[in-house]
Image: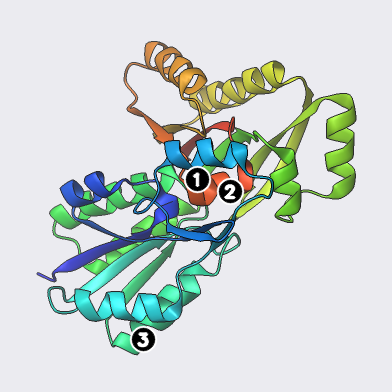
């Protein structure tokens, strides 16, 4: 039986402690705040990041892991593993997948790449599913293909906390940003084939958040859903309310809570709230 290394990047929001417990290897994204560069989840925690971001005059930036970092990483892994399965942030969001692929080739380490088509807690749920399949004795190629099938059925809706950061990151047009500010319209975004796209514009944040809950409830009433996650950035209060509400309404579902890592918070700001799930 092949010894499989499980790999992801820090946008999966898996903490270092969780990674150690679960046997997952994380390649961190770099977060640039002024003149300082931090390894996401290693040198800076989400709490520290969001606190510092509020005091910064300029928005922070991110930098994906380099090919050299991936190559060095895989050189170490191949000493203990026969191959790897790497579940990464959507290729439409970042070039991380390509860096991972080239780095593995340079290190001559066999790897199966899975484009999660999404980010954050949903990536963790894919990896956990993969590890269950590994326990069942499936071959790495089969596991990776199963995970790609699940990734094709990922769903999610989010209310973004900071439109300015989204606009500066090139994910929201200037016109849409202006209208949103003037009319207090809050866009709901969804995931479509690995891209984050506008779904609806709702007047007021409270109504937008209620609509996200409604969209999940519609899906749960019509289809079989699993790997459900409430994701948030900054304060967890509202997310915990949602978690409690959904657990009461769907006692047979396992529903997770995931804080967005600094690498994602750079682009969406504090106050982002959403629900992610898989339809199988």
Q: Position of residue 203 (x, y in %)?
A: 80, 21
Q: Nearer the viewer, residue 273 or 162?
A: 162
Q: Identify the mark nearer the N-term, 2 or 1.
A: 1
Between circles 2 and 3, the one closer to the viewer is 2
Q: Which residue is mark 2?
A: 266
Q: Which mark is residue 258?
A: none
Q: Which residue is mark 1?
A: 154
Name the element at disc 2.
Answer: helix
Quadrant for the C terminus, please.
top left
* Contact between labelled residues 3 and 2, with CB atoms less than 8 Å apart: no
Q: Position of residue 23 (x, y in %)?
A: 18, 55
Q: Tell me how far mark 1 sits from mark 3, CA to CA.
A: 29 Å
Count numbered badges in the picture. Answer: 3
Q: Quadrant of residue 75?
A: bottom left
Question: As displayed, is residue 250 above or below residue 13?
Answer: above
Q: Is residue 108 left or right of residue 113?
A: left
Residue drawn 30% across and 63% down?
Answer: 7
Q: Identify the mark nearer the N-term, 1 or 3.
A: 3
Q: Which residue is mark 3?
A: 105
Residue 279 is at least partly visible in this image: no
Residue drawn 27% across and 47% down?
Answer: 128
What colour scheme was applied to this rendering of the protein?
rainbow
Between circles 1 and 3, the one closer to the viewer is 3
Q: Identify the mark nearer the N-term, 2 or 3.
A: 3
Q: Tell me how far mark 2 sits from mark 3, CA to CA.
A: 30 Å
């Amino acid at each position: 039986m092949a010894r499989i290394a499980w790999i992801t990047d820090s946008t999966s929001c898996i903490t270092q402690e969780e990674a150690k417990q679960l046997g997952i290897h994380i390649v961190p994204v770099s977060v640039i705040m002024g003149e300082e560069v931090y390894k996401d989840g290693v040198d800076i925690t989400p709490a520290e990041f969001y606190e510092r971001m509020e005091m910064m005059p300029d928005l922070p930036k991110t930098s994906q892991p380099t090919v050299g970092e991936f190559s060095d990483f895989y050189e170490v892994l191949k000493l203990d593993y026969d191959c790897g399965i790497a579940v990464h942030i959507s290729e439409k969001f970042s070039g991380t997948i390509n860096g991972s692929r080239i780095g593995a080739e340079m290190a001559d380490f066999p790897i199966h790449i899975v484009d999660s088509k999404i980010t954050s807690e949903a990536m963790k749920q894919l990896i956990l599913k993969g590890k269950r399949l590994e326990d069942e004795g499936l071959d790495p190629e089969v596991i990776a293909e199963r995970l790609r099938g699940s990734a094709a059925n990922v769903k999610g809706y989010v209310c973004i906390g900071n439109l300015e950061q989204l606009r500066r990151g090139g994910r929201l047009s200037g016109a849409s940003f202006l209208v949103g500010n003037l009319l207090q319209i809050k866009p709901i975004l969804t995931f479509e084939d690995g891209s984050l796209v506008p779904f609806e514009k709702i007047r007021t944040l409270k109504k937008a958040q209620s609509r996200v809950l409604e969209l999940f409830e519609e899906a749960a009433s019509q289809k079989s859903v699993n790997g459900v996650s409430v994701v948030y950035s900054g304060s967890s209060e509202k997310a915990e309310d949602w978690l409690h509400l959904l657990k009461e309404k769907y006692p047979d579902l396992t529903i997770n809570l995931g804080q967005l890592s600094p690498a994602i918070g750079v682009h969406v700001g504090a106050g982002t709230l959403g629900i992610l799930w898989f339809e199988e």
